[in-house]
Image: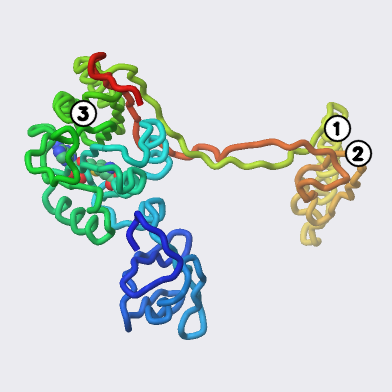
Amino acid sequence: MPFNSYKDIIEEGDLVLAYINRNHIKPIRVTKDEILNTRYGCFEHNEMIGMSYGEQMGGSRGYGYIYLLAFTPELWTVSLPHRTQIVYTHDSSYIIQRLNIVSGSRVIEAGTGSGSFSHAFSRTVGLEGKLFSYEFHEPRFIEAKAEFEDHGLDKNTLITHRDVCKDGFELHDIPQPFVKDSGIAADAIFLDLPSPWEAIPHLKAVASSTRRVGICCFSPCMEQVVKTVTALNENGWVDVEMVEVAGRRWEARKEMLKDVNDVIKRLKDIQARRNQGLELLKQSRASTPGEKREASNPESGEANPVKVQNTGMGFNPFGRGLRIKEGDEKFEWRDVTGIEPDIKTHTSYLTFAYLQPPPSARVSL
Ligand SMILES: C[S@@+](CC[C@H](N)C(=O)[O-])C[C@H]1O[C@@H](n2cnc3c(N)ncnc32)[C@H](O)[C@@H]1O
């Protein structure tokens, strides 16, 4: 099933994503008499034909199951064969909305790399829009071209084998359905290159001359950002801004409420337990050698457990040892949020800027 269309039922020849587990999604082409063998079971392609997208499929030997999912750019991003570093959905979705890329937009992307972002661009611009993608590494270009054809992206995507820093973006043999204003006339540009500042001077020739054109340069290092910003300023781009998208998982939970009296009680309890422990230690040292020791760990009081009492005062006075279920109605709680600490989320810095058409050329939308 191509990315730009939708259907409910799986047919022979469809591209299906076999969801094996959270970390393993396998793209397959449904082919008569083939079998998908996984460590969780065997799945016959013949049985997939006629099933619904999204359905759970049981293994043919009576154990294991997978889900048969339809292709989306988001799922492709997490299952594609990596040829390069790729752009992930938390960045691509932000860039698409920030550059106001919509159905009918004309977008330039360089380099193509593994084609992760190309799929998201292609779906967003739809059949009314166009994507012009450039890749200078020949084997990667060949693989991406074949993949785009296989996935039906070639209807709105033109991939070119080109070093854009050296030779720019202009094309002289654009297929007619891709031509606008006798050229590319891009209204959004995305550069995921090691040296975008070398490509920036070539962009005016292919940017729309009647609309405000947005650009995003995707660079992992601050030194690259500095050079990119300099090139954007020198080439007439305005409203330059750099952002970083930090994807974080938030959690919502309850926190036990305690007041100062609770804290005092807790401190007193710790002191009392300590004294009891020391007393037990003294007693065990004084006992005859060879006699069975009664308290081997006075701090924890394991052998002679100190009897502690839950006072029911609205907090857990004894901390360690007493497990209290979050939200237990005997205690007071408040709702709090927290984030997973120290997640490394830095992918790249996103430098945005805009190119204004000359006032005489502006058209109202
Ligand atoms: C990080 S990858 C792009 C990944 C892509 N955005 C994705 O989401 O899959 C960068 C690509 O740019 C290509 N590249 C680097 N310099 C280039 C240039 N001057 N012209 C064209 N492509 C270039 C590299 O070969 C590489 O495939």
Label 3 CB-ligand 1 distance < 8 A: no
Residue 9 image offset from top left, x and y in percent: 44, 70
Category of crowding for the residue at label 2, using alpha-carbon neighbours closer than 10 angstroms: few (below 14), some (14–19), many (at least 20): some
Compare marks 2 and 1 and give the one earlier in the sequence: 1
Q: Is residue 71 left or right of residue 144?
A: right
Q: Residue at x 81, y 51 (%)?
A: 284
Residue 239 lies, with reference to residue 328, above or below; the image says: above
* Amino acid beneath label 3: Ala
Compare marks 3 and 2 and give the one earlier in the sequence: 3
- Helix or strand or loop: what does disc 1 sit on? helix
Quadrant of res 194: top left
Q: Is residue 86 visible?
A: no
- What whole-number distance in Å separates the C-alpha atoms at marks 2 and 1? 8 Å
* Amino acid beneath label 1: Asp
Residue 141: assigned label: none
Viewer-proximal residue among 68 and 272: 68
Category of crowding for the residue at label 3, using alpha-carbon neighbours closer than 10 angstroms: few (below 14), some (14–19), many (at least 20): many
- Helix or strand or loop: what does disc 3 sit on? loop
Residue assigned mark 2? 313
Residue assigned mark 3? 207
Q: Is residue 106 visible?
A: yes
Residue assigned mark 1? 262
Q: Residue at x 78, y 54 (%)?
A: 302
Q: Quadrant of the N terminus?
A: bottom left
- What whole-number distance in Å separates the C-alpha atoms at marks 3 and 2? 70 Å
Residue 99 image offset from top left, x and y in percent: 36, 31
